[in-house]
Image (cartoon, rainbow, N blue to C red):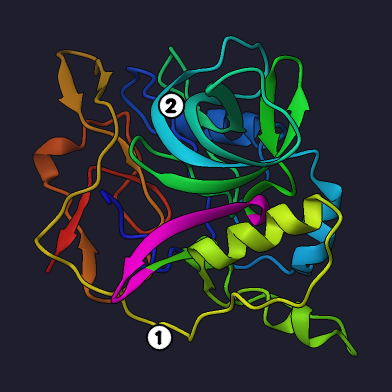
Amino acid sequence: MSRHRLIAMSLRSALTRCAGLPSVAPVLAALLIAAVLIPAPAEAIVYVTPTDESLVDRSPVIVFGEVLAAEPAPVDGLLSTDFLFQVEDVLKGFVPGSIIVVRQPGGRGPDGLVGAIVGLPALAEGDRVLLFLDPANAVYRTVELSLGMFFEVPVQGGTVLLREASLVEDMSLPGSSAAQRQSNQPREAEPFRRWIADRAGGLERSADYFAPELGENPAAIAEAFRLTVSPGQCDSAGGSSTATAASVWWSRPEVSPVCPAAAWPRCLPPCGPGTTIRGVAPD
C-alpha cells in the first residue's frame, strides 16, 4: 500500500489561495471568506462512534474495493473530489456496475484554492477500502463521513480494516455498550466483511472479527517519504516564482516540515504546522 494510515494526523484544516499578490493580506482575506464554506480549524473533534450494527443498518450500500483515480468534481460551490472506485465485493445493496464514483468534500480548485474538511481523510489512488455509502445523484457519499471508511492494512498473518488513525480517540457516552467502546479497534478483514454480509442478509450474530490492538506506531516504514500534492503556481509582483503547495496534517514528532526559503514566494503564508507547506520528510 502507498500510504501510512497508521501515522496519526492532527485534526486541522488548511485553506490557501496563491493570489499572485505582493502581500499575504489578500490570502488571509480569502481564508476568512472561505471559512464561511468550510469549518474552522480545530485541535480536536468530539463525536460518538456508532456501533457496527447501527452503521450497517443505516447504510444503503456497503462495498469493498480499490480507488483507481481522482479528479475534481464537476459541481459548483464547495470544493469536492470524485474518486473512481472499483468494486470487488458488494456486501449490502446494489451498484450498477463494477466502477462507481465516490464524491468527497474537499480538494483543489482550478484557481488554486485548496479545501479540506476537518477529520475527513482523503482517499488516494491505490487505497483498498471498505466503504459504507449513501447514493446521491449518480454518485455515492460515505455515511457519517470518515466513520464510514475502513482502510485495509497488511499485518503479520493477514490484513485488518482500520478507521483513519486520527479518529481513534472518540468520546463514548456514559453507559455505552462494550461494542460501542471497542468500535475503533482493528477488524480482521475477511471475518468483518462476512459479518456485514450476514447482517445485511438478515442473519444477526455476535461480532467475531475484532483483532488485537496494533499499538501507536506504524507496522513498518520501508523508506523515507515525502508527501506533496499537484504543484501550484504563484506570480509575485515584479517577477514570477513557483511553489509546490501541499496541505498536510501531521503530529508525529519523528516528522518535520521541509520548507526551503526559496520555495516561499510572498503570496504564500509562513511555513508551519497546520498551514500549507511544501512537503514533509523524516528528520
- Is residue 49 found inside the magenta-colored segment of the image? no
Prevalent SS, magenta region: strand
Closer to the N terminus: mark 1 or mark 2?
2
The residue closer to the viewer here, 239 or 88, is 88
Q: Position of residue 168 (x, y in %)?
A: 57, 73
| Span colored in magenta | 147-158
The residue closer to the viewer here, 63 or 184, is 63
Which residue sits at x=39%, y=38%? Answer: 124
**Crowdedness of circle 2 by 10 Å Cα count: few (<14), some, many (20+)?**
many
- Is residue 154 found inside the magenta-colored segment of the image? yes
Q: Quadrant of residue 54?
A: bottom right
Q: Give the vertical position of 247 relative to 174 (above or below).
A: above
Q: Position of residue 14 (x, y in %)?
A: 48, 44
Q: Position of residue 218 (x, y in %)?
A: 30, 73
Quadrant where the C terminus sits is bottom left
Q: CA distance from mark 1 to mark 2?
A: 38 Å
Q: Give the vertical position of 148 relative to 92 (above or below).
A: below
Q: Which residue is mark 1?
A: 215
Amino acid type for the residue under numbered disc 2:
Arg
Q: Which residue is mark 2?
A: 17
Residue 214 visible in rendering: yes
